[in-house]
Amino acid sequence: MRNRHLTIRHIAATALTVLLLTGCAQTRDFFTGSSRSDTSDSNVGILGAPEAEHYLAELQRLAVGDPATQAEIFADAQSGAQLTPGSQTNLRYALVLATPGHSEFDPGSAASMLREILARTELLTPAEIALATIHLKTAEQIVVAQAEVQRLRSATSRAAQNQENSTNQRLASVEAENRRLLRELQEAEQKLEAITSIERSIREQE
C-alpha cells in the first residue's frame, strides 16, 4: 500500500514538473524568440496596460519567494481584481492563481478566469494574450493531471478496501469453521466419555 501511494505521488510530481517546464519554455520562446520579429505588433498596447516583463517579474518573485512574499503578492493581486476589476487586474490575479509553489495555487479557478479574459481579447495587448493563452493551457493540463491522480488514489483506495473486506470475510469464515470444529470435538468427547462410562459400568457389574 505504501509503495502504491509513493508511486501516485511520483506520477503527480513528474506530470506537474513536465507541465511547468513546457509552460516556461513556451513563455521564453514568445518573449525571447519569435516575438522579436514582430516587435511592431507587440508594441501595440492598451493604455495603462503593464508590460509583459512586469507580469513575468512578479510571477518569478511569487514562484521563488518566501511564504510572506507569496502571501503579499497574492493578497495584492486578489484585492486588485476585487476592488478594480478589469482585464489587467483580472489577468494578474489569474496568473497568480495559475502559478504553482504557493498555498493559494488553484489551477481550476485560474483556467476559468483565463477563459473569460481571453473571451475579450480586444482589451488585452498581444503580450497579455500570449501570457493568458500559455498559462491557460498549462492550468488545464494540470487540472487534468490532478484529476487523474485523484482517480488513481480512489482506485487504489477502493482496491485496498475490497482487499480488506475480502480478508475480513476469509477470517470470519475461518473463525466460523473453527467454532464448528470445536463444537464437533466437544460433542465427540462427550460421546466418548458416555461410552467409556457405560463400559466401566458393565465391567463393574460383571
Image (cartoon, rainbow, N blue to C red):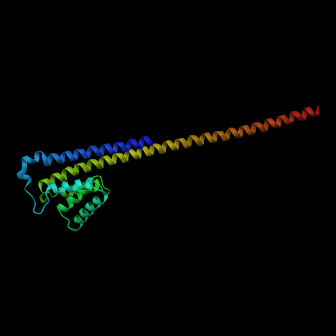
- Position of 20 with respect to 153 (left or right) is left
Q: Is 139 displayed left or right of 35 in the figure?
A: right
Residue 169, how many percent across, how many down?
56, 42
Residue 134 rendering spot, x and y as whole percentages: 20, 49
Q: Quadrant of the C terminus?
A: top right
Residue at image position (36%, 42%) is: 10
Q: Is residue 172 or residue 113 the one in the foreground? A: 113
Q: Front-most of 135 and 51?
A: 51
Query: What residue do we see at 25% from left, 63% from top?
Result: 78
Percent x, y of residue 128: 15, 55
Q: Quadrant of residue 176?
A: top right
Considering only vertical position in the picture, is 83 above or below 92? Answer: below
The quadrant holding residue 173 is top right
Q: Quadrant of residue 159?
A: top left
> Percent from the top left, x then y, of residue 62?
25, 56
Task: Answer with left or right where residue 11 lies relative to residue 90.
Answer: right
Image quarter in which the N terminus is found: top left
